[in-house]
Amino acid sequence: MEHNHRLYIAMYHYVRDLSHSRYPRIKGMDTDLFEEQLNFFKKEFQIVTMEEVISGRITGTLPEKALLLTFDDGYMDHFTTVFPVLKRHHIQGSFFIPGKTFTENILLDVNKLHFTLASADIKDLVKDLFSLLDEKRKEEPLLLSNEELYRQYAVKSRFDDADTIFFKRCLQTAIPEHIRNEISSLLFEKYVGMPEDCFARELYMSRDQIRCMKEDGMFIGLHGYDHYWLGNLSEPKMRRDIDKSLEVMDEFIDPDCWVMNYPYGSYNEDVISYISQKGCALGLTTIAKAACADDGNYALPRLDCNDFPPKSNNYIHAV
């Protein structure tokens, strides 16, 4: 397929005035750069709605250089910063929200890690993690050794060094859930020092804010309930997470035509089979390239916002 007929899906997480925030080291898009990027998109692409993408994937009628904007995790940034800017530019954004964030006001482990990383030196964090894992092995002798964990998971990514990826993977998926929950909370308490429930209420949108965006034309989709790596779960646990997400997101979605954004980009054939049975129209991944006609509707790739100007020109080669 020709370059111009590909669908570009831009992926955002934090969007805020970084230099004036409490956590300037958090990895996100600065407000001024977000505005600049939207102007670039309006000039160089045809920005489309999620409804147009769903229809276009079925009929093959998406415009040339179509671009979709997606925002993950239901952050307050999306209501206070992103939503007003999109409204001013008459652009729809698609927002994917873990159900747990607005129903339980519980801080997700992924966000404990983000803000711990933004508050401490990675070398100190890895050292602390090793010590805490050593303590846990007294109760859980089957835990892999620190050396083996590091060998398996300390693999540099596009945006993170090996130590950071090791820290993230250990506390996202590599060790048992009850252990990583406890360790991530201990490290969050040590380095961030704010009660998790208070932090969660500041970090995530409320149901009323999500409702406001939906009523004003924004698209709302699923991002799991607990923000699990769905592809790593047992099939019963995966189904429970998706079912719970569908239940709490019922107000915001069409039950016969909704969109799944896989947390961490993690999915497998069991996930695809289940969501397709439950009315899902599209599935979004974190595979870094533009989407073409050959990509299945349940494995659409996305490019990070940092792959576009003014951050970089990576999108040109992401085909």
Image: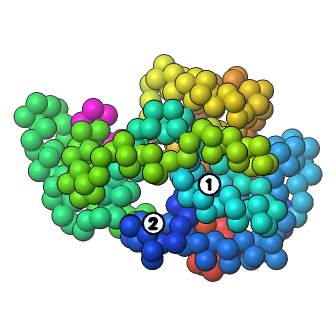
Question: Where in the figure is residue 34, as x and y percent of width and height?
Answer: 63, 71
Q: Which residues are magenta?
A: 173-179
Image vertical order of residue 127 relative to residue 143, above or below = below
Residue placed at 56% from the left, 42% from the top? 206
Which residue does the image show at 45% across and 51% down from the upper left? 202
278 sits to left or right of 154: right
Q: Is residue 176 magenta?
A: yes
Q: Is residue 56 magenta?
A: no
Q: Is residue 135 visible?
A: yes
Q: Nearer the viewer, mark 2 or mark 1?
A: 1
Residue hosting label 2: 27
Q: Residues within 10 Å of mark 1 (few under 14, many from 20)?
A: some
Residue 19 position, x and y percent, is: 45, 77
Which amino acid type is shown beneath numbered disc 1? Answer: Phe
Tell me where residue 15 sits by quadrant.
bottom right
Residue 289: x %, y % from top left: 65, 61
Q: Main secondary structure of the magenta part?
A: helix
